[in-house]
Image (cartoon, grey):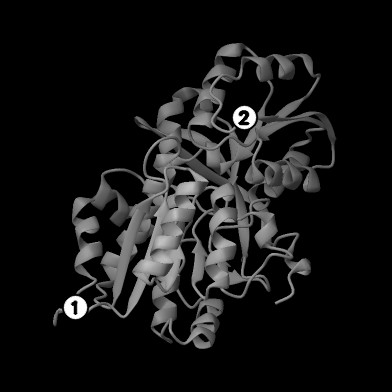
């Protein structure tokens, strides 16, 4: 990892010592709660930059500490002092809402490798804003579709009280055809779920859907497994991702989750990515790492066609999405959000490693519910 981070500075200078043509500012979460997500996005992104061997790109990386005020300060510094052309990296939707509208309105391109709040997909869309991961509702919509196919009729649903949490439950309910036993919002960063598990036990539900990313999901799953409540659990990949699974352990075995990426998706780009990421960092990649990798390769593919200084041409090059994605086919919808297939995966154990196995398609060529409200 140190080699790649050193390279991010070194590639600012070409062989002649000249400054890079394109400057990318990455603001992501590298400390505190949720740091693992930001580290994976950063590492996937920098792996792609290193593999490309480009001497015309500089990447400036900063830690937002998962605090909106710090993210805003860093964005101001990158735009006004660092003079970045492109920004990326934010994990959390509340931070994205604090940073993205101002950035794109100042002429900077923003490519999201994770956060996809509904407000930026519909009326708040912008021609300089591209989401390379998803619109927040998408994986939760797929979970609702999977629950229907499994025959669940009465779900207890919960998520943290912040924009992505609200999008999550909205997405699940949009596709789930059964009844909602109860719908609750937890505190962002919460670690004790005894009260919520007691409510699940008493609810009469036949299934549980939850969205609790990072450490929140680890705490919930461990406490749920110890509680004796045996209702089946469905969730998005955020709580069943590669790094999280090692911390959760056997409590997650058999749980089905939804994702637009998995390490066993069968295409050459994905196979090479999984192998090279594991070789470089000594761990299997997560979907966050895959999103960082895809985001960097999308940017590089656009730079092959146009300079970021030529906003119209560069925008068109981004929209073309002429790159090899770890997901296979990749295309943008009219609001610059992905149209993509979302899979159902099951948590399994391979030797000492907990990981996911793809079961099948939950939603094929799926767009988002807000594109019709985008007037670009």
Q: Choose between 319 and 269: the one closer to the eye.
A: 319
Q: What's the residue at 52%, 37% (across, down)?
A: 240
**Cα separation between marks 2 and 1:** 47 Å
Front one among 185 and 104: 104
Residue indicated by mark 2? 187
Is 267 placed above or below 190 here?
below
Q: Is 69 placed above or below 25 here?
A: above
Image quadrant in which the C terminus is located: bottom right
The structure residue drawn at horizontal position 75% and vertical position 59%, both measured from the top left corner, is: 369
| Residue 61 horizontal/vertical position (percent) | 33, 57
Picture coordinates of residue 306 (x, y %)?
43, 86
Residue 289 in sight from this viewpoint: no
Q: Position of residue 360 (x, y in %)?
A: 61, 49
Q: Residue at x 67, y 67 (%)?
A: 125
Residue at 37% x, 44% y is: 30
Which element carries disc 2, helix, strand or loop? loop
Quadrant of res 44: bottom left
Tag shown at residue 55: none
């Amino acid at each position: 990892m140190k080699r790649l981070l050193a390279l991010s500075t070194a590639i600012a200078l070409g062989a002649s010592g000249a400054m890079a043509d394109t400057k990318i500012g990455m603001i992501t979460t590298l400390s505190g709660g949720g740091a693992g997500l930001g580290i994976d996005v950063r590492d996937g992104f920098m792996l792609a930059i290193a593999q490309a061997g480009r001497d015309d790109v500089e990447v400036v990386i900063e830690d937002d500490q998962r605090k909106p005020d710090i993210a805003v300060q860093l964005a101001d510094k990158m735009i006004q002092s660092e003079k970045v052309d492109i920004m990326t990296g934010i994990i959390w939707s509340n931070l994205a809402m604090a940073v993205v509208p101002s950035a794109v309105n100042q002429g900077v391109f923003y490519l999201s490798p994770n956060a996809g709040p509904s407000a930026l997909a519909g009326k708040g869309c912008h021609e300089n804003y591209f989401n390379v991961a998803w619109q927040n509702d998408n994986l939760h919509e797929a979970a609702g579709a999977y629950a229907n196919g499994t025959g669940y009729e009465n779900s207890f649903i919960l998520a943290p009280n912040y924009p992505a949490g609200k999008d999550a439950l909205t997405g699940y309910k949009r596709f789930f055809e059964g009844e909602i036993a109860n719908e609750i919002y937890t505190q962002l960063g919460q670690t004790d779920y005894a009260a919520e598990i007691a409510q699940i036990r008493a609810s009469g539900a036949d299934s549980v859907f939850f969205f609790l990313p990072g450490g929140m999901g680890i705490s919930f799953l461990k406490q749920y497994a110890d509680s004796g409540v045996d209702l089946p659990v469905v969730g998005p990949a955020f709580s069943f991702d590669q790094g999280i699974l090692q911390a959760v352990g056997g409590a997650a075995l058999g749980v089905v989750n939804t994702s637009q990426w998995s390490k066993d998706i069968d295409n050459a780009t994905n196979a090479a990515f999984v192998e090279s990421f594991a070789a470089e960092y000594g761990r299997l990649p997560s979907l966050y790492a895959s999103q960082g990798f895809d985001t960097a390769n999308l940017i590089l593919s656009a730079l092959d066609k146009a300079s970021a200084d030529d906003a119209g041409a560069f925008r068109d090059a981004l929209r073309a999405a002429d790159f090899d994605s770890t997901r296979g086919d990749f295309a943008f919808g009219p609001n610059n959000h992905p149209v993509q297939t979302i899979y159902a995966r099951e948590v399994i154990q391979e030797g000492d490693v907990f990981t996911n196995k793809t079961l099948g398609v939950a939603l094929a060529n799926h767009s988002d519910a807000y594109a019709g409200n985008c007037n670009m």
